[in-house]
Amino acid sequence: MKPVQIAPAQGKLGILLVGLGAVSTTFIAGVLAIRKGLSKPIGSLTQMGTIRLGKRTDGRSPRIGDLFPLASLDDVVFGGWDLFDENCYEAARTAGVLEPALLDQIKPELEAITPWPAVFDQRYVKRLSGTHVKTGRNKKDLAEQVIADVRRFKKEKALDRLVMVWCGSTEVYLTETAAHASVEAFERALEANDDTIPSSMIYAYAAISEGIPYANAAPNLSADIPALVALAATTQTPLAGKDLKTGQTLIKTIMAPGLKARLLGVDGWYSTNILGNRDGEVLDDPESFKTKEESKKSVLDYILQPHLYPDLYSDLHHVVRINYYPPRGDNKEGWDNIDLVGWLGYKMQLKINFLCRDSILAAPIVLDVALFLDLAKRAGMHGIQEWLSFYFKSPQHAPGLYPEHDLFIQLMKLKNTLRHLAGEELITHLGLEYYD
């Protein structure tokens, strides 16, 4: 196999973040702290992960960051939008994720990052309101204002490349309409202020129009519509999403494949979450919660495949609850009760209590997705990047395909894509060659 030609990561990479709340400020502060040697990039595959090449007996397992021309953290520049005008230091203090002692060591750098006014409409995120927002004639005008922000940022910071990640709040539940069917229909809908185009789609359209790789870290309908997928094909833009796989769903995509592998039945899976950050406040609205619920509940259906294993999973009762509880802040608690069925129909239970930190789990994912999308762009890859489904609850996929949710299959897909780019043999784990 010949390696894919990948353009070098020359110059600086601008990472554009829509929403400078808990996730974004934890991500930005983390990168700044790592650059200063104050901490380590724990949780990041691009920074700490290795990849096996060749046979097990070859002993070749280089770090991913050494094998591929990923953008250096020293070359990353941050910019973004928010409906509140706090700079990143103030926003990080408000979020309350990171200790003030750490934030104070990078205070000047954080204070220098101030948000641009956001595209925001409270109809799509009902529990939030802000005054640091754009106004315009219509949604097409708002998209053009976002593009102007991007172009100005690129020029002022002398950037070579850009990536955009939606880290904003979960929007209300929407489904595809005629406005989403084609680029032409979508642009007419922008002009007409169509209600089925939420803020996230305006950002996605702006990024894709400029050929900027775009990822959706939330579960709302965004770039995963025919119009924007078609536009991405025209502008040669990589896409990834949606909804970062962090706490409870991360555990679910680890546990469910194991139970299915041993053909243990599941009668019920009750999941509840307690969190008190802005995300919890937004999800306290039933319409935003439905968007998140659809993302979280679909995981088990695709992993367990009840149509193939009706005796084991056809009567599964899957319940998902999210409870806004302000005292908990960003320290989310995920609690799962799993009712299992074993040999001869004997009942068992598994209980999982995951006391996690949502933004701490999300920050390294934002980093990896941004760096891998930049790599994809330089490798000539465009459209849906299914190999990045490892990072998402509701992986974007081609029409007619079911999404792959099994974390271990997703990781194999990701690493085999990297092996393909490097011109290395894909690893099937067959292993017969060791016994010939």
Image (cartoon, rainbow, N blue to C red):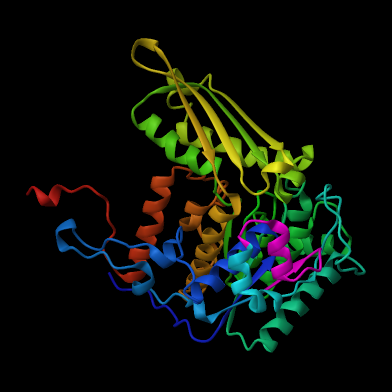
Q: How far across and how far down the image is residue 312, in percent?
A: 44, 21
Count of all numbered marks drawn on residues in the image: 0
Q: Is residue 69 magenta?
A: no
Q: How far across and how far down the image is residue 27, in percent?
A: 59, 64
- Residue beneath the point at 48% across and 77% down: 71
- Residue beneath the point at 53% across and 59% down: 365
Quadrant housing residue 136? bottom right
List the single residue furthest toward the front.
Answer: 101
Residue 174 visible in the picture: no
Report the magenta residues as a range: 79-99
- Residue beneath the point at 69% across and 56% down: 222
List the single residue furthest toward the left.
Answer: 436
Above or below, 117 against 352 in this view is below
- Residue beneath the point at 68% across and 47% down: 329
Foreground of the two, 327 or 140: 327
Q: How far across and how far down the image is residue 344, in percent?
A: 35, 10
Quadrant housing residue 18? bottom right
Q: How far across and how far down the image is residue 72, in percent?
A: 47, 78
Foreground of the two, 178 or 402: 402
Above or below, 230 against 267 in this view is below
Q: Is residue 92 magenta?
A: yes
Residue 219 visible in the picture: yes
Please indicate whether residue 280 sits to the left or right of residue 106 in the image.
right
